[in-house]
Image (cartoon, rainbow, N blue to C red):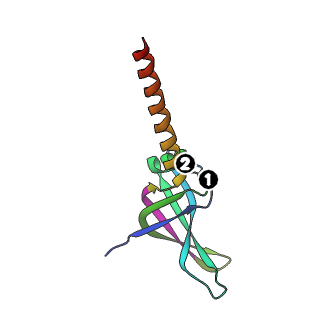
Amino acid sequence: MVNSVMLVGRLASDLDVTKLESGKEVTNVSLAVPRSYKNADGIYETDFFDCTLWEGLAKNAAEYCKKGDTVGIRGRLQTDSWEKDGAKRIKVNIIVEKLTFLSARKIEEQEVADDKDKTTEKATKKSKDAR
């Protein structure tokens, strides 16, 4: 049997890590994934998937990701069920096992940082050459 999910979408909110009584850290976020086709009104609809990240993955994602960032996730589906007002409720959640940062903003920030490093190196070399 295989229980595997891969999605690419945008984070619907900022991530906030919660420390549980057990000491484990967790964060929950919705992933907005646009459909690849237009509806009858000519609009691309978007599906929202509830995702859970644990421990180090939760901390790293919260540190480096913001609302609107594009990410790729790989994980597994997990169902939770409970009763409320006599009716049985079921929720499907994605337990994220791998997260890949895909936002252009992160790439652009890294390119700017790399350019600053190169400019500093050139200035240092010119300064040494002038001596």
Q: Earlier in the sequence, mark 2 or mark 1?
A: 1
Instruction: Look at label 1 and name its amino acid.
Output: Asp
> Do residues under tags 2 and 1 come within 8 Å of each other at their CB atoms?
yes
Left or right, 84 with respect to 71, comes to right
Q: Residue visible at 47% across and 56% down? A: 102
In the depicted structure, whether residue 103 falls above or below residue 94: above
Please tell me how crowded label 1 is: few (under 14), some (14-19), or many (20+) other residues with Cα within 10 Å.
some
Residue that numbered label 2 is attached to: 62
Look at the image and tell me whether residue 24 can be seen: no
Left or right, 126 with respect to 47, comes to left
Chain part drawn in magenta: 90-99
Residue that numbered label 1 is attached to: 14
Q: Residue 46: x and y, percent?
A: 60, 74
* Number of numbered discs visible in the structure rendering: 2
Q: Residue visible at 46% across and 67% down? A: 7
Q: Quadrant of residue 69?
A: bottom right
Q: Nearer the viewer, residue 12 or 16?
A: 12
Q: Residue furthest front?
A: 130
**Secondary structure state at the residue bearing disc 1:** loop
**Secondary structure state at the residue bearing disc 2:** helix
Residue 91 inside the magenta-drawn segment? yes
In the depicted structure, whether residue 124 falls above or below residue 6: above
Q: Nearer the viewer, residue 128 or 87?
A: 128
In the depicted structure, whether residue 118 falls above or below residue 56: above
